[in-house]
Amino acid sequence: MTRTRDPILDLLTPLRRYAYALTRNRAEADDLVQDALLRGHEQRRQLGAGKAPGPWLRAILRNRFLDRRRHEVAQARREAQFAETTPQVIDAPQDSALRLSQLRRAFLDLPQDQREALELVAVEGLSYGDAGATLGVPAGTVMSRVSRARARLRAFEDGVPAEVPEPRPALKLVARSDPGGRP
């Protein structure tokens, strides 16, 4: 029993040359030929009886090459769009932790009355009236304390040194003079 040589085997070298001309890369050319032969085998019913497989396989090879290039261009475009939306620089987490620690220290360094008022209004979400009721002071006093606390924290954020209040003179007890001459 004699076997006839498969005509596809005679096409391998010309297909590899054509694929190399398209890709300019031997490994990519071999992959392209293999892909074209696989596609040709899957669609072998499309090749009419008695027709030469060479032009048909070259057309498949060229179409596979164009499909790959279109896929690569689309992939590069998607990656570029993703790169535009992704930040190039990410803050170091230790910077945020340090900053949070500094801000916590600044909050704790606030005077007691301002710290309490700010905590009740800004952190706990109480209204000025409710915070005033909790602290036993009018709502206006709470507003004033919160405003001063926020101003001090803003000054801290801006790098302005905290103002050290000047010492107030001590109150003197003054004896009330009595009309009868008694102190």
Image (cartoon, rainbow, N blue to C red):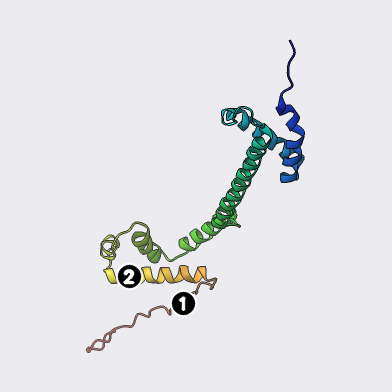
Of circles 1 and 2, the one toward us is 2
Q: Position of residue 141 (x, y in %)?
A: 31, 71
Q: Kindly indicate the quadrant of the structure image that contains residue 43.
A: top right
The one of 21 and 118 positioned closer to us in this rendering? 21
Q: Kindly indicate the quadrant of the structure image that contains residue 137.
A: bottom left
Q: CA distance from mark 1 to mark 2?
A: 24 Å
* 57 to 49, vertically: above or below: below
Residue that label 2 marks: 143
- Location of the N terminus by quadrant is top right
Image position of 182 (left or right of 38): left
* 60 to 75, vertically: above or below: above
Image position of 86 (left or right of 123): right
The one of 43 and 166 positioned closer to us in this rendering? 43
The 10 Å Cα crowd at callout 1, few under 14, some 14 to 19, many 20 or more, is few
Image position of 63 (left or right of 174): right
Q: Residue at x 63, y 40 (%)?
A: 64
Q: Position of residue 120 (x, y in %)?
A: 34, 60
Secondary structure beneath disc 2?
helix
The residue type indicated by label 2 comes to Met
Residue that label 1 marks: 167
